[in-house]
Amino acid sequence: MLKPFGKTPQPSEYRTVLKKVNWQRYEQLLAEMERNRTARFSYYRGQLEMMTPLEEHDRCHKLIESLILTITDEMGVKIESFKTPTLKRVDLQVGVEPDTAYYIQTADRMARRTKIDLETDPVPDLILEVELSRSDFNKFEIYADLGIPEVWRYISKPGETFLKGQFFIHYLDGNTYREEDYGLAFPFLPVGRILQFIDQSDVSGLPTALRDLRLWAEETV
């Protein structure tokens, strides 16, 4: 029987949640899958979520990271970035793996490091999260427990329009996060300018978007 014509379903990021996973098992999984793992782990007090990102996910991440590196270059400040780091605290029973963690104020301290150990290292100044599928976890609870001061989130869906998503800046205010148009790391950079950069990269290409971003930064920073 012929199937009716219709749109081909878009692929989606695969997420699965395991319950009643103790900390020892979580650490064991991290160690066993360290070299060949593609999934991102989030752990919150006995629950473990595993997410396998799509190619669009990494493309979004690299695009926004190019903006961050360009802005810090124009500012003349150092920055240390850690791609998909494992941020965990056994005393809090939480762990998370964002797309990237950035150190700006404490960049010198984290230079030439390959991993982050929150038992001894400072928390990152900025976290970048790309979401092409909804997590079952409230990541803000994890980030608040860890004391991450600022979180950037790009939310979209897989497919041809994955660069037409929404962008949010959140910073920690007490024990909760507030959504604002400007952040802490770059108080001169509004959400609208970030979205403009993403859209221009999609329409005109990344080199053109980076050139215009530098011109804008030269007049603004």
Image: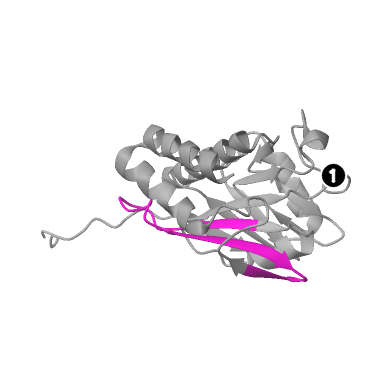
Q: Residue furthest front?
A: 219
Label 1 environment density (alpha carbons within 10 Å; few <14, some 14–19, many ≥20): few
Membership of 155 in magenta stretch: yes
> Where is residue 139 shown, x and y percent of the image?
64, 63
| Above-or-below relation of 18 to 159 | below
Q: What segment is highlighted magenta in the picture? A: 151-178
Q: Which residue is drawn at the image coordinates 63% and 55% (left, top)? A: 187
Q: Is residue 197 left or right of residue 19?
A: left
Q: Which residue position is annotated with label 1?
A: 121
Membership of 130 in magenta stretch: no
| Above-or-below relation of 19 to 220 | below
Question: How many marks overall?
Answer: 1
Residue 4, visible in the rendered structure: yes
Q: Which residue is drawn at the image coordinates 53% and 57% (left, top)? A: 190
Task: Write down the quadrant of residue 203 in the picture.
Answer: top left
Foreground: 200 or 28?
200
> Where is residue 86 shown, x and y percent of the image?
71, 46
The quadrant the N terminus occupies is bottom left
Q: Which residue is drawn at the image coordinates 64% and 70% (left, top)? A: 178
Q: Is residue 109 left or right of residue 48?
A: right
| Above-or-below relation of 180 to 198 | below
> Where is residue 121 shown, x and y percent of the image?
84, 44
Task: Say which amino acid is labelled 1.
Answer: Asp
The quadrant the C terminus occupies is top right
Dot 1: what SS? loop
